[in-house]
Amino acid sequence: MSLNYARELLKISLSQLCDSIGFDTTSEIALDILVDVCERQFQSLSKETSNLIQLNNRNQE
């Protein structure tokens, strides 16, 4: 899956989420910033999860 495709899917998901919590419209810039923040959070969560898994595997041996 290309990064652009994944980013567009995230943008659509966040748009739907904003709509479901009561926002009628969102500016393109605000939505892009929200996508950037979510991407960074997902990356940070993934790195931390990977580190914890590696640490756990070292402790089990």
Image (cartoon, rainbow, N blue to C red):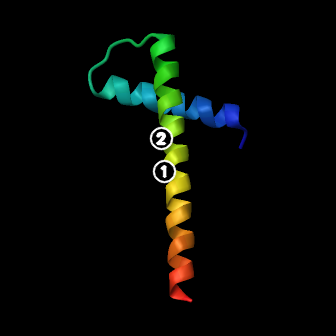
Looking at the picture, which amino acid does disc 2 mark?
Gln
**In the image, is residue 39 above or below residue 47?**
above
Where residue 46 appears, as percent x and y from the top left, is 54, 53
What percent of the width, then of the height, locates residue 43? Answer: 55, 45
Q: How many marks?
A: 2
Q: Secondary structure at mark 1?
A: helix
Q: Position of residue 22 (x, y in %)?
A: 26, 21
Q: Which residue is mark 2?
A: 41
Q: Identify which residue is drawn at 57% across, 71% down.
A: 54
- The quarter of the displayed image where residue 27 is located: top left
Q: Which residue is mark 1?
A: 45
Q: Amino acid at mark 1?
A: Leu
- For the view shown, which residue lies furthest in the bottom direction? 61
> Measured from the top left, where is residue 28 in percent x and y?
51, 12
Nearest to the observer: residue 16 or residue 38: 38
Say what secondary structure mark 2 lies in: helix
In space, the residues marked 2 and 1 are separated at their CA atoms by 6 Å
Residue plotted at (56% across, 54% down): 47
Say few, some or many: other residues with alpha carbon within 10 Å of mark 2 (under 14 / 14 to 19 / 20 or more).
few
| Residue at x 49% of width, y 66% of height | 52
> Which residue occupies the foreground of this view, 46 or 35?
46
Q: Quadrant of the N terminus?
A: top right
- Measured along the vertical axis of the image, is residue 1 above or below residue 19? below
Asked whether the beta carbons under mark 2 and mark 1 sit within 8 Å of each other, the answer is yes
Position of the C terminus, as image quadrant, is: bottom right
Can you say whether 23 is above or below 35 in the image? above
